[in-house]
Image (cartoon, helix red, strand yellow):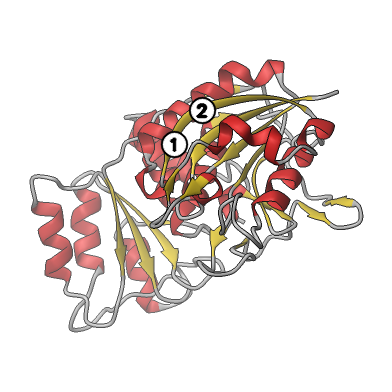
Amino acid sequence: MKKVLLLHMGGTLGMEGSPLGPGNYSQKLIERVPELSHLAQLDIRILCNVDSSDVGPEEWTRVAGEIARGRTEAHGIVILHGTDTMAFTAAALAFTLEGLDRPVVMTGAQRPLAAHRTDARRNLVDAVELATCDIPEVAICFDGLLLRGCRAVKGDARSYHAFESPGVEPLARMGFDVDIGAHLRRPRGDFRCDPRFDSRVAVVYVTPGLEPATVQAMLDSSAAPRGIVLAAFGVGTVPTKARALAPVVRRAVDGGVEVVVVTQRGGIVELGMYENSKGLADAGAIPGGEMRIDAATAKLMHALARTEDRAERRRWLTTDVAGELA
């Protein structure tokens, strides 16, 4: 029987009480979901037990290290995680686990395992089964679908179909059979784990009426970010007239701040398509391809930590590392 390393980080799946809070369910996981013992030999480890809104770069570093240490003894890894920041963690792991040669499957639930009509049981069983398959990617398993981790986004907080991966077909579909897609990525080198992150990244969501002075004040503060994810309109457009943002971006880039542009609505960023996006390219902003905010934030945090060589950092940010750009 194949071995699966199951890492518990918290989330709704194991919560209890009212209001919901972390419980001690994991100690009786096999008892509550006995079919798991027929799918794989589980090694269950509790890394933390928190609401995922409390998960950040420190936890990403810890779970990546645990995967690196335990991967050779397991066919695959399952991570139980809250849904609110699951896509951020999945993207962070996709960038840090280079040359990944086995599945790392994240899952959680919209209702606790002990609740009636819970989705936790199905998600957990699906995730463990998928962790025994030949799928060498970081992915999110939810509602019968396995989604590429660095392309997944949480689309609904009140639906069992909570996640989607716009522009990318699921890596697998769990129906009568396990239907695995032909577009899986394969490792291109030896496994390497680099779990470093610089949390000094801010997300600036462009809205009508956004004052450039507001962004400049953030850059001038004592807690100024080293990187900005700029969530622009359309394919990367921003105001260019009364509230032009490109000059602020230019000052940020000249001051050593990396600015990655993503779109608010899905699709690919093309900074050369419109006059209102070309200004960002001329200012030195980096196009984020098809990345959404989750992946762009994690990638920028990792890029800032992995090298001080700015040319190398910018080259890596524009490289399709795990299928995040296109």
Residue 218: tell me if it is visible: yes
Q: Residues within 10 Å of mark 2 (few under 14, many from 20)?
A: some
The label shown at residue 108 is: none
Q: CA distance from mark 2 to mark 1?
A: 7 Å
Residue 318: tell me if it is visible: no
Query: Considering the numbered disc 2 on the image, is that residue within a helix, a strand or a loop?
Result: strand
Residue 22: percent from the left, percent from the top? 43, 43
Residue 23: percent from the left, percent from the top? 47, 41
Residue 77: name its quadrant. Answer: top right
Q: Residue at x 70, y 35 (%)?
A: 31
Check whether the beta carbons of the residues at disc 2 and disc 1 lie within 8 A of each other. Answer: yes
Q: Residues within 10 Å of mark 1 (few under 14, many from 20)?
A: many
Residue 62: percent from the left, percent from the top? 44, 26
Q: Residue at x 44, y 62 (%)?
A: 262
Asked whether, in this view, residue 9 is left or right of residue 223, the answer is right
Residue, disc 2: 46
Amino acid of disc 2: Ile
Residue, disc 1: 49
Residues 10 and 275: in front is 10
Amino acid of disc 1: Asn
Query: Considering the numbered disc 1 on the image, is that residue within a helix, a strand or a loop?
Result: strand
